[in-house]
Amino acid sequence: MVEFRYRTDEVTEQPSVTLDAFLDQSNATAVRLEPDDDARALIPFLDRLTLIEVAFPKFRDGRGYSAARILREAGYQGELRAQGDVLVDQIAYMRRCGFDSFAPEASLNPDAVARALAYYDHAYQGAADSAVPIWKLRHG
Amino acid sequence: MYKYDNYDQAMVDARVAEFRDQINRRIAGEMTEDQFKPLRLMNGLYLQLHAYMLRVAIPYGTLDSRQMRMLAHIARKYDRDYGHFTTRQNIQYNWIKLEDCADILEELATVEMHAIQTSGNCIRNISSDQYAGAAADEVTDPRPWAELLRQWSTFHPEFSYLPRKFKIAVIASYEDRAAMRLHDIGLELVRKDGELGARVFVGGGMGRTPMIAPEINPFVKADDLLSYLEACLRVYNRYGRRDNMYKARIKILIHEIGADEYRRQVAEEFTHVKTLGIDPPLAELERISAFFAPPAYDAANVEPDRNDPDFALWLDQNVKPHKQAGYAIVNISLKPIGGIPGDATSAQIDVMADLAEKYSFDELRVTHAQNIVLPHVAKRDLYAVWQALRDAELADANLDLISDIIACPGLDYCSLANARSIPVAQKIATRFADMDRQRDLGELKLKISGCINACGHHHAGHIGILGVDKKGVENYQLTFGGSGAEDVSIGKIIGPGFDEDGVVDAVEKATEVYKALRKGDERFVDTYRRVGLEPFKEAIYG
């Protein structure tokens, strides 16, 4: 269940299909990527996708962070959802990598999430969010 | 030395608040230990055999007297009055209480220090050459580059849940004092057509599968470096093995797909990443470099008076040439005979801070061999420095000799260890306590690990000792011929292991074989490489 969503558009109603299924028939508008899947396989189809769900079966498996950035770097504008073993202290990094909705398996304390997102005013490095890296702030 | 601006300070202050929140949620039961573990590790907090251990970052091993005094203060107030300097140029405290951690980080933040990413499956503290800025053979000071990397890697959103830990070293000399090619990424700064850039080595490491990093790129320009490193890390994050933690380091990926294929994938990724605009302008490297401008040297070139024989001994062994005439690099040994390698008491840490302030332009360095360096001491002050060190029991003249042992904490502290390291180090140092004997043996790097994870760098020891558990009994394997320097190599196991006293005897026998066979000014490792294992084996197993 989507517990946190940082978008204003309508939630897509279509259930997401696997990457293999999408590449086979591909009139779907929602896809689910497993950690093993190559996010770049979706690049030719990004225009017609409204939801990409990235699975985190274990929070320690960080491949989904790269998948998210790759999709955003390729221009994907739709909803990018982290689903699975998603924890409070990962959400800030996930936001920076381009995720804008979260469906944690175990419900999260919304106050703790809000605090975790508010600790840092700036970031050292550029990523997939709109944060201006500190080096850029220093040099204008 | 680098000084934080408001942005840097805000980052460490926020980290203190965030970690305090995390600890509170853990104590309140909102997080399981399994969920808390990676968070505490990314703040350097381990749960060891007897207590929590806190590892504090000393970025590229450089610190000033104010920071050094803070390390003493923390040892005094929150630990048992001592700290342990590590092979990654950090310091760790062995007896920390969980409820004190946030307060400790808060105190550290007041002197621009932290424990960020000193553990966990993320980019760890960046290490470097302890003689940076003082070595005559460097093409540039590597520390500004290391600071640039420190900032880039801090809270990196994509690379904080990597398959495994990730260590980066930066050097700028041909002589390698940082074991650069035994890191996940080793950078050697070089000049090409007048322009500075980095020679990039990827996939080195010790642990259970030691590997020497192959060169992946002979020259990456300064303003491409972060993009290139992002490409290196992204390929690893996506394709590094996650099915087996013992095969998850980047060295295994590169070994499995081959350096050529890895290089190709990185090149392809780099072409893409370079378009994202994540490289700071050269002005940022220049801004950082200004903090590392040479100090105001003013001493005349006066050779010290060598009348005191103990001082002369120390001068010959522990003091190294400086690029500035009239100055010298002082190595402070943390390897007293019979002591614990790398340990220093609060009082000793304060003494070293005072000496740095008075005699070394307020600078200290930590070395990967677990010693301390005063990088810029006027030669006229060397005798005064030595006297103060002697009074603090810090004047052992054994740099790079057999008693200058690297040892991990071992089974005395560590929850991963199979055997104790410290008592073996103590026995070997005691056996060779006679300084004439040590000096006769010359440079002999002896390194001891208490388990296969190789924190004591045994693979890189001219003589390496690996403690294993053999049916419930501590057993020690010997390796010869390793090196972490520019002549990098991995040591080879010489035969069946020994008990604690047996391994000390075997080391002694090996030194006798060396003395009998050495030619000219060959070091132990040179003789071993020339004659091979047989004569040693015969003497030891006979």
Image (cartoon, helix red, strand yellow):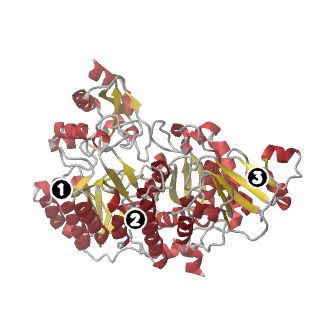
Locate residue A15, reporting x and y percent.
Answer: 80, 52
User: Which amino acid type is shown beneath numbered disc 3?
Assistant: Arg
Q: In the depicted view, which residue is nearer to us: B101 or B171?
A: B101
Pointer 2 residue: B114
Image quadrant assignment for residue B60: bottom left
At x 62%, y 61%, the residue is A94
Neighbor class of circle 2 (other Cα within 10 Å; few <14, some 14-19, many 20+) is: many
Neighbor class of circle 1 (other Cα within 10 Å; few <14, some 14-19, many 20+) is: many
Pointer 1 residue: B395
Locate residue B333, reporting x and y percent.
Answer: 24, 53
Compared across the picture, whether A54 is left or right of B248 comes to: right
Tell me which chain the residue with mark 3 is part of.
Answer: A
User: Which amino acid type is shown beneath numbered disc 1?
Assistant: Ala
Q: Where B377 sits versus B208, above or below?
A: below
Q: Which mark is residue A40?
A: 3
CB within 8 Å, label 3 to label 2: no
Given this view, does label 1 or label 3 mark the residue nearer the observer? 3
